[in-house]
Amino acid sequence: MPEKETIQRARRDKRQGKSASTQAGEFVHEEIDHVRHGKHGARSTKQAIAIGLSKARRAGVKLPASKGSSASTKRQAQHDIAEGRTHHKKSAKRATATRSALKRETRASASHTALSRQAKSAARKRSAASRSAAARKAARTRARNH
C-alpha cells in the first residue's frame, strides 16, 4: 500500500499536467526509500523500480508498459492497470510471503552506485537521437522555468 503522501504527490503531478512516468516516479522514489531504510530489500535495482511502477499502476496512474517490454511484462502492466480501476482484497498470506521474501534480499540494490549503474545501462539502450532530443527538451524546460 503506497503512503498517503506519495499518492498526493502523484496527484499534484497529474494536476500540473505532468506525464504518467513523472507521476509513477513518485512511487518508484518511495520504493527506493523503503529499501534504503530497511523496510525490505530487492534482488536488483530493476526489481525495486518494477515494484514502484506496479504500485503506481494499482494506485491509478495510467502508465502502459514500454514498447520494448516482454510479453509477460506487458500482460502484468495491463493487469496492474485493471487492478487500479477495481480494488480487490489482497491475500494476507501472499502479502506476508512476499514481504518476508523481500526482507531476505539485499539493500545494496538502492545504493547511489547501483541506481547510477541502472540509469547508465538504461540510457545506453536508447539511440543517440533519442538521448539528444531528451537533452534538448530538458534545456528548453530549464530555460522556460528560469
Image: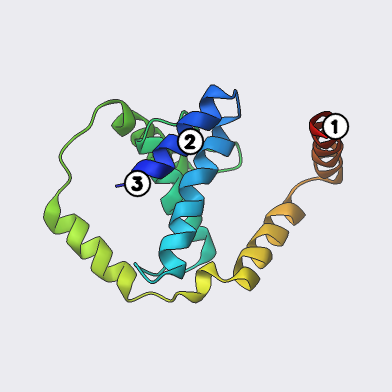
Q: Is residue 122 left or right of residue 63?
A: right
Is residue 70 visible to us here? Answer: no
Determine which residue is flagged by label 1. 140
Which amino acid lies under the numbered mark 1 shown in the image of this protein? Arg
Where disc 3 sits, the SS reads loop
Q: Is residue 91 above or below residue 133?
A: below
- Counting residues from the start of the chain, the first of labels 3 and 1 encountered is 3
Q: Residue at x 41, y 62 (%)?
A: 34
Where disc 1 sits, the SS reads helix
Task: Estimate the spatial distance between the alpha carbons at disc 3 and disc 2, rounded to whole Å.
Answer: 11 Å
Task: Estimate the spatial distance between the alpha carbons at disc 3 and disc 1, rounded to whole Å.
Answer: 33 Å
Q: Residue at x 59, y 24 (%)?
A: 16
- Counting residues from the start of the chain, the first of labels 3 and 2 encountered is 3
Q: Is residue 75 left or right of residue 137?
A: left
Q: Is residue 73 left or right of residue 113?
A: left
| Image quadrant in which you'd find residue 68 | top right
- Kindly indicate whether the residue at mark 2 contacts the one at mark 1 (C-beta within 8 angstroms): no
Q: Is residue 113 left or right of residue 36?
A: right
Determine which residue is flagged by label 2. 10
Q: Residue at x 38, y 74 (%)?
A: 105
Residue count near mark 2 (Cα–Cα under 10 Å), binned few <14, some 14–19, many ≥20: many
Residue 98 got which mark?
none
